[in-house]
Amino acid sequence: MGSPKITHVSITPIAVLDAPLLNASGVHEPYQLRAVIELDTDAGVFGLGETYGDDPTLRNLRAAVPALVGVDIFDLNELNRRVAVALGAVSSSSPTELVGRASRAKTVAQAYGAFEVACYDAQGKATDMRVCDLLGGAVRASVPYSAYLFYRWEQHPGYAVPDDYPDDDWGAALDPDGIVAQARRMVDVYGFRSLKLKGGVFEPEAEADAVAALRDAFPDLPLRLDPNANWTVATSLRIAPRLEGLLEYLEDPTGGNPGMAEVARKTSLPLATNMCVTSFEEIPEAAALDSVSVVLSDHHFWGGLRASQRLAGICDTFGWGMSMHSNTHLGISLSAMTHLAAATPNLTYACDTHSPWQREDVIEAGALTWSHGALAVPSGPGLGVELDRDALARLHEQYLACGLRKRDDESAMLRADPAWPPRRPRF
């Protein structure tokens, strides 16, 4: 009978509620865009995937879909070849969610990775195996995640949302006290055992004050700060001494491998990145300059689960630690992240997640449960999650109604504060 072959692929864009989270690029808009991939086969098994939902990503995914019919779900090399050929035959767009330097290779990797996850889900259902077992076996039964702390407003500006928009109940966090209160709630509710603060928003000294307040409030928890490359090298070197002894690592204080290397030479802080090492092409420069100590992987833009494991091998070779980057995601992606982390021995730092900020999902409840800041690897075949079709339909309608078609934190901030300076680095 042979292996299952792809017969149909559907891509459904959705919009989910998001909080007014501040970052170096501006502020999150009221909705974040995602896309859900459903892959059908001639054997009756199906697979799920999830990726970004901006217009360029959707164009690239839809351009590749016709070429996928007939591909064996286990023949991932052929899947990759067909995606690359399909995107080479059209004017593919660089997705607005792409991290780091844009390139055709990265655009192809992003599109392929989305379909690859769906194939792995289908493979698991066809063989009654979990994705982590298909990736080599789980080396940990549960995967620890880090609380993701954000400076934030209490609510979105009134002009940016419909009258019936449901604000969340987290409240504002604009100073050290607000950040500590946010962290305390996340630790109490989810049990997180490490804390990460998204920086690059306020004066660096103020963000160092917040880190110090977190250390006082949580003396035993590892801390991280991510200014998102919004500091100059000089600013990074001025602030680093205040952070030494407080942080597990400092993530992307400044931009580019040369700048990161200059900072790394003059501080004892380990430097982490998801901005200057975002593709295989960028690894030789980072290794030559010794610019980083920790790389944050992300299967959404590295090219899927296999590519992420290839990255893990390279990190092991150079003695780099590994964590995992997070963007706004739903349960399909979170399950894929958990399976990948479970099957990657040297991914030993707690992974990032936006889950506490998520109020809507497309999966049935129960497959992903938090305990002590970690997620147990789902036990069902494939990704171990089931699609909630009613939620998918509702969130697609929300996508159609919200009017957003790409992420644009900068424009959202400038509408709220026309005097806000969009230059990078700002400090």
Image (cartoon, helix red, strand yellow):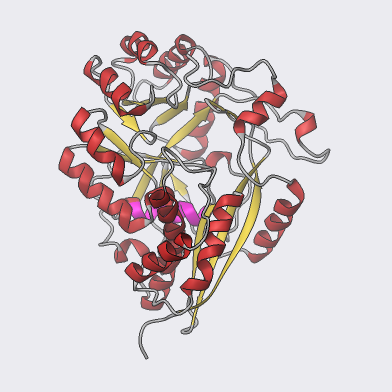
Residue found 37% across the figure and 75% down from its top: 128
Residue 261 visible to the viewer: yes
Q: Main secondary structure of the magenta part?
A: helix
Number of callouts in the render?
0
Q: Quadrant of the N terminus?
A: bottom left
Most distant residue in the bottom direction: 1
> Residue 299 at x, y = what percent?
39, 51
> Residue 157 at x, y = what percent?
74, 28
Residue found 41% across the figure and 38% down from its top: 101
Residue 53 visible to the viewer: no
Asked which quadrant contains residue 217, the reply is top left
Left or right of residue 95, residue 20 in this image: right
Viewer-side residue, 374 vs 199: 199
Residue found 36% across the figure and 77% down from its top: 127
Q: Is residue 155 above or below residue 134?
A: above
In the rendered structure, which segment of residues is drawn in magenta?
A: 331-340
Q: Is residue 46 above or below residue 414?
A: below
> Residue 331 at x, y = what percent?
52, 54
> Residue 221 at x, y = what percent?
36, 27
Viewer-side residue, 387 vs 272: 272
